[in-house]
Structures are given as structure tokens and as C-alpha cells.
Amino acid sequence: MNALVSAPEPLAAQRTGAPLLRSLALCDLVDSTALVARLGDQRGAALLRRHDRLARDLMLQHGGQEIDKTDGFLVLFERPINAVAFSLDYQRELKRLALDEAVALQARVGVHVGDVVVWQNEPGDVIQGAKPFEVEGLVKPVTARLASLALPGQILVSGVAASLAQRAHGELGANADRTRWINHGRYRFKGVPEPVVVYEVGEAGIAPLRQPPYSGKAWREVPWWRRPGTMFIEASIVLGALVLGLWLLLRPPAAIAFAERDWVVVGDVRNLTSDASLSETVRVGFRIGMEQSKYINVVSDLRVRDTLKRMQQDPDRTPVDRHRAAEIALREGARAAILPVATEVGGKLRITAEVIDPTTEATVYNESAEGSGAESALDSVDAVNAALRQRLGESLASIEDNSVPLEKVTTSNLDALRAYSLGRRAHVLGNFGEALALFREATELDPDFALAYVGMAGVYISGDDKREARTVIRKAQQLRAKLPGREKLYLDGIASTLDTPAEMYRRWSLLYKMYPDFHGAYANHSLMLWTYGNRVREAIAVMTPLDTPHNARLGSSLYLLGTLNLANDDYDKALHYLSRSADLGGNSLGLVNAEWFAVQRRFDEAAAELRKSDKSGMASNDIFRWRPRLVLPLDRGDFAEAGKIADEAIADARKTGPLYLRIFEGMRLGIADVLPAGTVKAEDLQRFVRTELAAAADSDDPDVDHAVTAALYGAYLAARSGDAKLATQVIDRLGKQADASAFPSNNDMAAIARAELALQRGDADAAVKLLQPVSGDENLYLAHVALRDAYAKAGQPEKALEQALFLASRRGQAYEQFGALHMLVPINVKESTISLLCAAEYSRTLGREQDAARYADEFRRAWPGPLPQAYAKRMTQVQAEGKAEAPAP
């Protein structure tokens, strides 16, 4: 009884008895004692030696380790598939040996997997006859029970071992096609607390392939009336059989109380074919097919992953089998679970799907279809999906109206379909760079794969790269007929981001009105309201339906809700949503988490949070990680550091693309008055304005609306710095275009630029009149800055103070207002602090000395270091006036 050391585990682990996850196979020769008695000691011993030699050769071949030997062998394996492969070869070779020796020679085999404790006996004990190694654990008696239950020539495998081995079925090589799996049901084993699902694996002509009989130590779980011990008298048996027969005849078919818009969980595909790629094909086919339904909702991959994590399972390594699919369905409030299976039967590819009731794990419906070869998979999935949808209550008319054949809406190229499926998964996990590469690979494999182009467009839009998005949107629109109904509306929504805000709002709201549980439509509608209309409160209201466990992207939805509430200066709600988002891993780059602290001037905590930010893998998205890195030192008054980081950000933006270079140059220009002398030159502003004017004149530029806003922003900065000529040039060129624009930021910025030019001409009243219509909560923060200055110069200090206090108190809006792709954030944040100095000045003018002193102190606490010359002079004057006004002691 020799044993071999498990190579993958260190010897120290075995000496200390550390638990190992291993597979056991127990081979038990049938009636070996009678065999020896029949053959005689000499011939019987020779036969058993030959048997042992073939068994040990097979152990070596399959990586098995002999642990014990009596009438057969107890063998330890790394993986269940190795134990199964050994057992199949063992039964085959045993039959050959029986034919050679002309004797009846059969064995029972049991296979199980679980934790075992392995330890090494002391050398002295081994000398005395002990085995070199010992193996213990519940897996050992269960394996023994399986072997004792088996019929002669039969291999019985526990459900957990079968599930793992079936996933690696293709590793059986040439024997895979001949091997069959049969589920014999749940058995109770004496001494084992939990029931065990028992499978048989074997080859026709070698294995019995039939139900094993009851034994004193193992019995199948069956209704009480079928247990032998309950059949006391013949009359009771007859009556019970009659009653049972009538009940079975008359009972209604099993059903699930499924209603419109209920949810289902789609489990992993049990792929029992030799083509491993079919798993992904069938999986994504079932999902896309079900997602075409307006009647059924499918729990997303992302929600399944999150649920597995809550179950303390690794979502990348845990198969969603029957038991796990049922538990996920119960946790997610889904009514049913669907379990797809791919098998090869008589040279045909059969696709089967079971619908199970998650509360009992009982099969309610079972549908299948088959065809020739892997290319038939999508047609079969279509047929099974349609049958299941009808079984779940969807009308035939609805199925016909809302179903497009999978091969039409996906691709006949299975490699392209796999790339698309993996791209979808990467996208929902926030791996934008990986998602983009996979979608692109899918379109290279099949240039007419419409869904893959839609996926690429979604990634580009989420990264604010409209130029690249436009190219793939046009390609997807050319292939629109190949899209399912929901994805057509989704494409329209994405395409609307190249249109007017009103069209964006209409398209996204139409999508969620047609598909109320398509949560991405609500999020995109909300995003458009915020980014293009500054309609923060309305955007928050649109997001309300998304705070539901069924939302596949709940984490990112909560992050957007946190951002919107911070923009609305509701810090408590913002923290609530941002914290929940962080718990779910949906906080994207995590920049708003840092800005939540910065808004409250908790800069050390903001910097610590910012250090947690990771790249998304998409350059047009990651470039904005520079925004808080620039704004934080600016906001705390470290202007030299802010200037240094602004230069670094511009250098990185230059490599990312011209649009991003323009954005960061605009950021630096807005804070030029506080940066060290020489950081920004007059010609920098002139070059910026010329670039934006040229972009605004290009009607084919998808970011033309941004260029108009940016050019008018340049005009405002020019007028503020005394360059009325440059400001007038821009306003003359773009004023009418901005007034007629459907983009609110263009309207606001035109009014701001005109008002600042009026102030430079000395017409403060005209400036006030221009700005009053754009001074609401939904207008640019910068409009309130301009109105503050206009009221001050118009001799209205009370109203100027009102605007200054608004600006100082709305720091969340300053940080999070999206206008002009966040280009205005640095100037907004700067002005939120300068407004404290303005409030001190206006309070002094109004004779409110205590208020003036308080605001001046707040300003100095905000910027405690050396002040830029212009602001130092103003601060000195405020303090001097305060001393002059102070009463004599």
C-alpha cells in the first residue's frame, strides 16, 4: 500500500495536515475473494498482479497517486476530470483483461471531490507497517459509498465532481465522443448528513448506464409511497398505486407564476460537446434572444457577478450551475432560472434549456432543438428561446413582433460573437480600453456585425470622444436592419448625442418608455440633462428608478447620483450615494469622491482619495484625471503648484488629442490671474481664441457646440483683461450663432461675453440687463460671477453681495458643473474663493463691519499663503479700511 507525494503541494503542508481540495477515485473489484478461490492461489495471484500493474500504469498516465489498496485502489487526483479519465480507461482495460484471461472480471468505481487532510507518517511507523501517507476527510467515506452503490462495471460520480468534470469534458480527447453522462438523482448515504447528487459516466457496451439499486447504506430520495419499507400490505400498495396514477394523470403541468416584466437568471452553459467555443456562443445567444423581449427581463451579467461576490464566490471561477442560479434568482427577486445545455446526440448539436423554479430547483419547462454542426447553434437557440418565452406567458404576437433571428442580429462568425460577448462583459466592468479592443476585433472578423459597432459607439460616447463615435455610429446606422428593436432605439439614443439636447432628451426618454427596465436609458437621459442643460434637479429626478437591485450598473448609477447631488450642493446625499457606489465598485475614476472633500476644503482627505484613482484604459476618459490634480492646489492657494500641474496636464493632453489640448489650455487661461507671472502670455489667449473660432466654423466637427462656448469664453477672458478688440471680434463672429443655438451653454456664454464687454465700456447697467435672464440655477456658474461684477460696478452692492454669497456657498456647483467639458471648473473654483473677498468688500461698502471682517478671515483661511499681487492689494485695502472704521479704544 504505497502512496505518492502530491507534487503540487509542499511537503510541509502534508506534514502539518493542511486541507487540500482533491478528487478521490475508489476502485473495488467485484467478488475478488471468490475469483481467487475459483482460479486457485497461483493463477489468482498472477491475475491480480496483472490487474494491479495496469491500474498503476493508468494512475501514472493520469497523474493519480495511490493512497491505499485492498481489493482495489484508493487513488488521489488533482482534478475530477483526471479521476474520471482514469476510471473510464480502467473499466476499458479491465474488460480487455477479462477477455484475455477468459474470466469474469468487473469493478465498481466511485469518484468524489472535496477537502482532504493529508499527512506524512513518521519513518519509524512506516517501518512497522504504517502507510507512508494518510488521507482523511468526508470525501473519503462518500467516495466509498458511491463505489458500494455502483453496479459491476459502473462508475458513479458525485454531482459536484460531475459538474467540474463536465466543464472539462473535451479533455477526454478521443474518448469524449463515446462518453455519456446520466443523472441518477439525489441519494442519501448512511453516515453522510447531506444528500448527494449521483451521476453515472461511462461508455456504451462497457458501462451498465442504468439506475443503481438500493442498498442498506445508500438509497435514492423518492416520495414516501415509493419506499420499499412503506409497502406493508398488498392492498395498500394497489390503492396507493391507483391514487398516484390518477394524480399523475390529472395533475396540471408544472408552472411558474410569471408576469410581464418579471426577471430571469440565465445560468452558465453546460457544454458537453468537444467544441469549447460553443459555451460563449450559446450563452450570448440566449441573452440577446431574451433581451429582445418586452415581456421578460434578464438579470445582467454584472448583477450575477455582484451576487456571486455577496455569496463569497469568485465570479471569474465559479460556474453558475443549477444550485447557484437558483440562489442568485432568489437573491435578485427573479421568478425563474434558465439553464442552457449543449450536447452532441447522434452526430447532431442539441441545444436544451431548462426553466427551473428557484425555490425548489425543480425543472418546470424543458425545451430543446438540434441541428447539424456548430453553425446550427444560433438557429437552435432562437427556437428554444421562442418556446421558452411562450411558456413563460409572452404572447405569440409579441414574440413575432419583437424577435429578429439571432444570426441576423449577431453574426455567423462564432469567433466574432465570442469577442463581442467578452467586450460586453469588459464594458459593464468599466474596462473601456479592453472593451473597445474586443468590439473592434469583432468588427474585423465580421465587418457587418452591427451590435459590435453599437458597442464601440457606446464606449466612445462614455469617453466623450464624439469624433470617433460618429464614425462607428454611421456604420451601425447603415446596418440598422440587423439590430434588435431595443438596440435600434439605443443606437438612436447614442446618435442623438451628435444632435441637439432636445433630441437627446427625446430619444433617451423614448427608450425607457418603450423598455421600462432598460436602466441605461434613464442614466443617459439624466446625463444629457446635466451635461448639456445644467438641469441638475431634473436629472436627479430621472435617476430615481435606477436605485433598484435589478439595475445592472447600480454602482455607476449611484456614482452619477452622488455627482448630481454634489452639483446641487447637497453634500449629505452626495456622500450617501458615493459611499454606496464605492461599496459596489462603480465609482469610475473616483474623481468626484475626491472632490466631495475638496468642496468642503478638506484637501488632505481629497488628495488621499485622489490617489486611489485608477485609469480606465481609455485615453479620452483618463485625461480628465488631471482636472482635480490641477484644481486641488489652486483651491488651497498653492498657485505655483497649480501652474506646474497645468503645464503637465497640457503636455499630456497634447498627446491625447486636439480637443483635450484645447480644454486644458482653456482651464489654464481661466486662472491666469493667480498663476505665477509669465505662466500665461497674452498671445496664449489669442491663439486659443483663433483655434476655437476655426473649430466653430467647421460645421462637420461633432464638437462644434463646445467650440462656440469655448470661443465666447475666450472673448469673456479677453474683455476682462482689457482686450476689447479681440472680444468684439469673437462676439461679432459667433453672437448670432450662439443666440440661435439649441445648447444652453452657448446662450449663457454669449450673454456673459457681451456683458463683460459692456462693463469694459463703462455700461454696467447694460451688463446687468444682459445677465439677469441667465442668472438662474440652471445657468452657468460663470454667469453669476459676471453678474456679481456687474452689480458691483452698477453701484448695487446689496445685489452684488447676494451673488458673491451665492458663489461662495455653491462650491459643489463650481466643481461639478459640466459645461464646456469641465473646462470652466478651475475658474469656477477660483471665483468661489474670490467671492469671499468680494463679500468682504461689499459688506464694508454697506457698513457691515462684522460681516466684512468675517468674510475677510474666511478668505485668508481659504488662501493662507502669499496672495497674487492684485488680490493681496485688495485684501490690504479691506483690512486698512476696517482699521480706519474701528472705534477708538
Image (cartoon, rainbow, N blue to C red):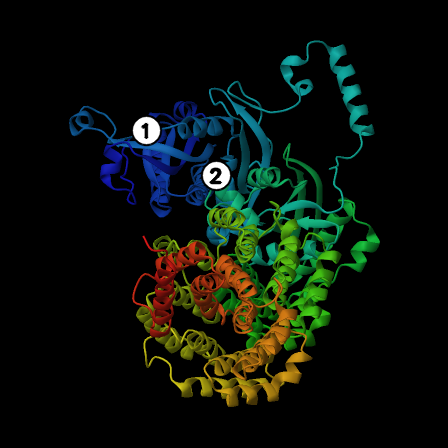
Query: As drawn, is 512 to the left or to the right of 54?
Result: right
Residue corresponding to mark 2: 161
Q: Is residue 722 above or below residue 536?
A: below
**Picture quadrant where residue 508 is located:** bottom right
Mark 1 / mark 2, whichever is N-terminal: 1
Mark 1: which amino acid? Answer: Gln
Q: Residue furthest top?
A: 233
Residue 881 at x, y percent in the picture: 38, 64
Viewer-side residue, 595 vs 328: 595
Numbered disc in front, either 1 or 2: 2
Visible residue check, residue 405? yes
- In the structure shown, which secondary structural element does the residue marked by tag 1 occupy? helix
Residue 484 at x, y percent in the picture: 71, 63
Residue 370 at x, y percent in the picture: 69, 54
Query: As drawn, is 694 to the left or to the right of 96?
Result: right
Mark identifier at residue 42: 1
**Quarter of the rendering occupied by the N terminus:** top left
Mark 2: which amino acid? Answer: Ala
Q: Residues within 10 Å of mark 2 (few under 14, many from 20)?
A: many
Count of number-bearing discs: 2
Viewer-side residue, 112 vs 506: 506
Q: Residue furthest left?
A: 124
Viewer-side residue, 304 vs 563: 563
**Picture quadrant where residue 418 is located:** bottom right
Viewer-side residue, 652 vs 455: 652
Query: As drawn, is 38 to the left or to the right of 702?
Result: left
Residue 297 at x, y percent in the picture: 68, 49
- In the structure shown, which secondary structural element does the residue marked by tag 2 occupy? helix
